[in-house]
Image (cartoon, rainbow, N blue to C red):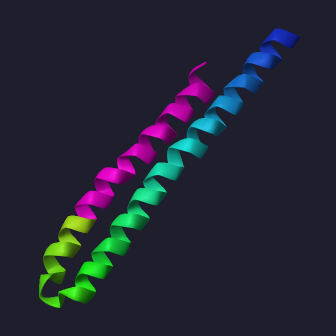
Amino acid sequence: MNIAEAIVKAACAIGAGLCMGIGAIGPAIGEGNAVGKALEGMARQPEAASNLRTNMIVGCAITETTGIYALLISFLILFAL
């Protein structure tokens, strides 16, 4: 392995790490915010708890797909190149 190939491998590893680092922050903040607001709504109106819980779970599932896409892209960067 020459120096150019080593630099490319290092750049791929750094890129994959940045992809997961940045790609995981968004879903974490979004899900934390959604759960916090849902719990606040359940505390204010307990009769609406089931509806809020259902919507929160669907929203968290949609938000989590961003993190899964980031993981997929980082795997592609690491192993496809």
- For the C terminus, the quadrant is top right
Q: Is residue 54 left or right of residue 5?
A: left
Give residue 29's position: percent from left, percent from top.
46, 58
Give residue 10's position: percent from left, percent from top.
77, 26
Range of the magenta residues? 57-81
Residue at x 56%, y 43% (from the top left corner): 22
- For the N terminus, the quadrant is top right
Q: Is residue 46 left or right of residue 67?
A: left
Q: Is residue 1 visible?
A: no
Of residues 44 and 30, the one nearer the viewer is 44
Q: Is residue 23 left or right of residue 69?
A: right
Q: Quadrant of residue 13?
A: top right
**Residue 40 falls within the magenta-colored stretch:** no
Residue at x 55%, y 34% (from the top left corner): 75
Give residue 9's position: percent from left, percent from top.
74, 22
Q: Is residue 67 left or right of residue 6?
A: left
Q: Quadrant of residue 19?
A: top right
**Residue 69 falls within the magenta-colored stretch:** yes
Q: Does residue 2 lie above or below 25 as drawn?
A: above
Q: Does residue 1 lie above or below 26 as drawn?
A: above
Of residues 43 and 6, the one nearer the viewer is 43
